[in-house]
Image: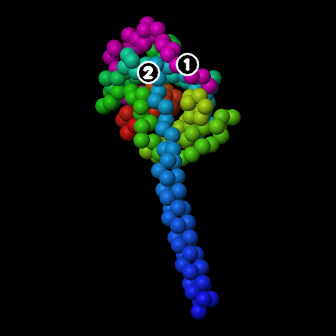
Amino acid sequence: MASASSFATKATNSISLLFFISIFSLSIFSITSSNLPNNPIPTPWPHQFHSILVVNNSGSNQIINLWYDWTNGRNFNIIRKQLGEVLYDLEWNNGTSFYYTLDSNKKCKTVKFEVGILRPNWLEDANYLGQQKVDGFLCNVWEKVDFIWYYEDVVTKKPIHWVFYTGMEAHVMTFEVGAVLEDANWQAPSYCFEKKEKEDNPKLKSSVNGESSMEGFLRGSMGL
């Protein structure tokens, strides 16, 4: 009888110990889970910056000087196609954009969008995908509305690489926070305000559609 009683006591103690371990384990899991850090969020863009981008768009190479100036409600992409002409993409927060050249052809097209340039926090609510090494930098990666995949350096929080749903890729070569382009450079040429060229002008249409690869990227009209 003593043996049976001893066995029952040991069994009860074992069950109690297992129950305690289970409760303790659940408590630890609960504490650990509640203290897990939230996914990182993209750093909002500074209100003013200058960046040089090397862009590959379906095998076509471009260098883009990007001047972002949220403070004054404007954005400027100066797009140089490899061994080609320079296209100026001047965007205002009232939705007006001018696409023009400064060569003897004097090409210009004015486009009116329903929205202005991107807000500094345009990547808000982007989907975090984890970390990946790109261009030699360890980056946090986000995806926004299946439109852009955005890579940001883990250490400096600077943008490194952008991939668009079209396959176009932009490599960020420089990122100068606080840099501002002089006001005189933000004026579209006078011929942009003269009689508009016909929209079906093939030469102008080719330049605007083919070389203005950043059109829409800095536009809230893409849902960003």
The disc labelled 2 sits on which kind of residue? His
Residue that appears at 50% across and 16% down: 178
- Mark 2 and mark 1 residues within 8 Å of each other at the beta carbon: no
| Foreground pick, 170 / 49 | 49
Residue that mark 1 sits on: 176
Q: Position of residue 159 (x, y in %)?
A: 56, 31
Q: Which segment is the magenta one?
A: 172-201
Placement of 213 over or under 97, stated as above or below: below
Residue visible at 54% across and 78% down in the picture:
12
Indicate the secondary structure of the residue bearing disc 1: strand
What SS does tag 2 mark?
Answer: loop
Residue drawn at x 42%, y 28% as measured from the top left:
120
Q: Quadrant of residue 219?
A: top left
Q: Nearer the viewer, residue 104 or 133?
A: 133
List x then y, in percent, for residue 138. Answer: 64, 37
First in sequence: mark 2 vs mark 1:
2
Taking the spot 37% from the left edge, 20% from the top edge, the residue there is 73
Q: CA distance from mark 2 to mark 1?
A: 11 Å
Which amino acid does the dot numbered 1 rest on? Glu
Mark number displayed over residue 193: none
Q: Residue 133 or 5: which is nearer the viewer?
A: 5
Is 7 in front, or is 183? 7
**What x and y, as percent, mark residue 34?**
47, 50
- The answer to whether residue 80 is left or right of residue 116 is right
The image quadrant that residue 163 belongs to is: top right
Q: Position of residue 196 (x, y in %)?
A: 34, 20
Is residue 182 a member of the stretch shown in magenta? yes
Q: Which residue is mark 2?
A: 47
Whether residue 42 is visible to the viewer of this picture, yes or no, is: yes
Is residue 203 among what the camera can see? no
